[in-house]
Image (spheres, rainbow, N blue to C red):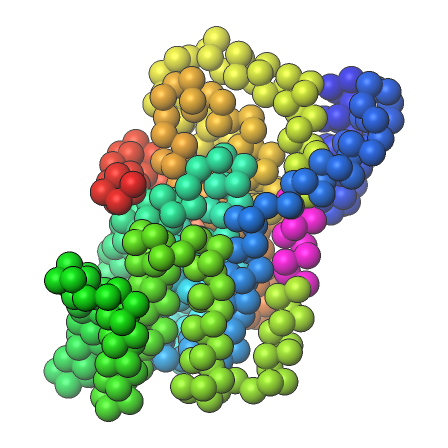
Amino acid sequence: MTAVLLISFLVLMCAGVPVALAMAGASLLYVMISGTVPDFVVIHRMVNGIDSFPLLAVPFFIMAGNLMNSAGITNRIYNFALALVGWLKGGLGHVNVIGSVIFAGMSGTAIADAAGLGTIEIKAMTDHGYSKEFSVGVTAASATLGPIIPPSLPFVIYAMFANVSVGQLFLAGIIPGVVMAVLMMLTVAYFAHKNNWGRDVSFSWGKINKALLELAVVVGFPTAIWAATEAGTDPALTFFAAMAALLAADHFFRFNAVLPIMTPVLLIGGMTSGIFTATEGAIAACVWAMFLGLVWYRTLNWKMLAKVSMDTVETTATVLLIVAAASIFGWLLTVTRVTDAVAATVLAYTHNPAVFLLLANLLMLFVGCFLEPTAAITILVPILLPICHQLGIDPVHFGLVMVLNLMIGLLHPPMGMVLFVLARVAKLSVERTTIAILPWLIPLLLSLALITYVPSISLWLPRQFF
């Protein structure tokens, strides 16, 4: 009967049935044939699968990313990154990476990064004489930072299925995101040296000083709140006073990106200090994005807001349908003891955590090429996490490893959504886009190796706060 469940799922997938319907259909077929489980359990388990408070964060993070894209925030991020690193050799390649680091702190998804910043960056790079292949490659690689640097939709999904703290996962992604960005910028520097590229904008102390001042303001905001709170000042009063000072500074200095960059600072600061949960933080991110678009920058109108809301509903419905279908599928995998069988097989082969992580990476890289990340997480977590517990692998660390593997899978056919988005944006064939991305697998796989086998890269920050 277990074979009925797995074979029917694979047959439906190969027939081109959407993954959510394939999981739900295979589960229903198993229930009907086995006769050991009442039919209504399928619906009951699917409903319970999305009846979760942490999952409320999903639509709000999706909406926050859509609002930032629609409100023209991406242009401000691009201009800030251009002032900061555009004067380096291969400048627009570095701008691409820095822009993605900042936008990752707002969108939470690789596809939003590729579709939002990618449109601006690829056009700017081709206008400055870069090949489309290089422009697409660096944009695709940097888009993987979206779900690694918090906030992150895949982390929310993983946290629900693995029963770990969303806040810990968010903190765990910060240093790995920085490591990935550094390796990507080193790759850009290599290509710039190899091809003897020059600067894309002239060196200007004025622009650099203004960009550094913006960074100082962003860093100073939480520092000032912490210092005032330690001195005994009311936290709420301190926060609103700091916000008023921040808005005044933005109005006076005409900053490009201070307020957008504050989004991840507010989220991480609020969660680590206990002001709000990840779900409440997602709502706060939406309110902040609406304030910037409707009130402060006035680049968003009510008609655009209605469109953003409908796009959010559509995307959320897709994600939650996958989660609901995966809930019954994952439950049946557990009931039929498939997860126990996989664990026994792996543990019979090796009890070495390093060997298991290597095998898990190979499996997740393969699965990531065929399944959307949400579906892959919901299927793989019940299978692999019990083995992690038996081998003493931290589930937060394993969450980082799993999400990064699945993000790399987004860059490859047949199911790589980032690949298809960038092929459409750059007007390149899927084949040429795939070839353009291949050199960028080197920094991505090196990042994966470091994050996999040096757990402190992921776990140092969570251990400081939790």
Name the residue nearer the viewer: 170 or 47: 47
Q: Could one spot residue 366 in this view of the protein?
A: no
* Magenta range: 314-323
Position of 304 compared to 141: left or right? right
> Magenta includes 253?
no
Residue at position x 66%, y 25% from top?
A: 333
Give residue 272's position: percent from left, percent from top. 31, 51
Position of 154 compared to 258: left or right? right
Residue at position x 23%, y 42% from top?
A: 464
Residue at position x 36%, y 44% from top?
A: 168
Name the residue nearer the viewer: 432 or 67: 67
Give residue 117's position: percent from left, percent from top. 44, 71
Position of 314 compared to 240: left or right? right
Give residue 251's position: percent from left, percent from top. 28, 89
Q: Could one spot residue 460 in this view of the protein?
A: yes
Image position of 188 with respect to 310: above or below: above
Specify the quadrant of the image occupied by residue 237. bottom left
Image position of 113 with respect to 208: above or below: above
**Residue placed furthest toward the bottom:** 252
By secondary structure, the bulk of the magenta-drawn segment is best described as helix
